Amino acid sequence: MLRAVVEAGSVKPAAESLHRTQPAVSQALKALEVQTGTEPFDRFGSRLELTPVGRRVYLQSLQVLSEVEDLNQLVRLFDKGH
């Protein structure tokens, strides 16, 4: 969801792209704020821009997502007997 919000620039189009409700995405962002103890976005009306900490969290999350995809590919290879 974080990636979708960053790419869309606001919650509403991110929710639409994820086929989720706007409140669900907002709740996920709030959970991220609580978990990290910081606000990942500066808000300008409905437009959201990453804070410096938010940028770091976002970039790290991209690395994690890439590693998860690599792991999924590895598991698929093993399932095929390679």
Image: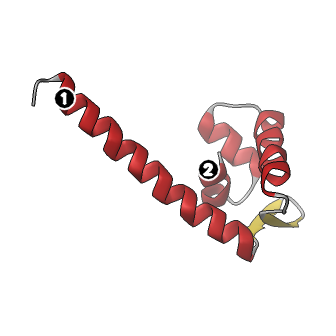
Q: Residue furthest bottom?
A: 52
Whether residue 16 sits left or right of residue 29 in the image: it is left
Residue position marked by numbered label 1 in the rendering: 78
* Image color mode: secondary structure
Whether residue 5 sits left or right of residue 28 in the image: it is left
Q: Which labelled disc corresponds to residue 25?
A: none
Q: Can you tell which quarter of the image residue 57 is in?
A: bottom right
Q: Residue at x 75, y 55 (%)?
A: 10
Find the distance from the CA under tag 2 to the CA under tag 1.
Answer: 31 Å
Q: Residue at x 76, y 40 (%)?
A: 25
Q: Which residue is drawn at 84% across and 47% down?
A: 30
Counting from the top left corner in percent of width and height, residue 37 is at 85, 58
Quadrant containing the N terminus in the rendered view: top right
Q: Which labelled disc corresponds to residue 4?
A: 2
Single out the mark in the foreground, 2 or 1. Answer: 1
Badge 2 or badge 1: first in the primary sequence = 2
30 versus 56 height, above or below: above
Whether residue 61 sits left or right of residue 14 in the image: it is left
Crowding at mark 2 (Cα within 10 Å: few <14, some 14-19, many 20+): some
Crowding at mark 1 (Cα within 10 Å: few <14, some 14-19, many 20+): few
Counting from the top left corner in percent of width and height, residue 55 is at 65, 70
Q: For the residue labelled by badge 2, is the local secondary structure a helix, a strand or a loop?
A: helix
Counting from the top left corner in percent of width and height, residue 64 is at 49, 53
| Residue type of the residue flagged with mark 2 | Ala
Counting from the top left corner in percent of width and height, residue 31 is at 81, 44
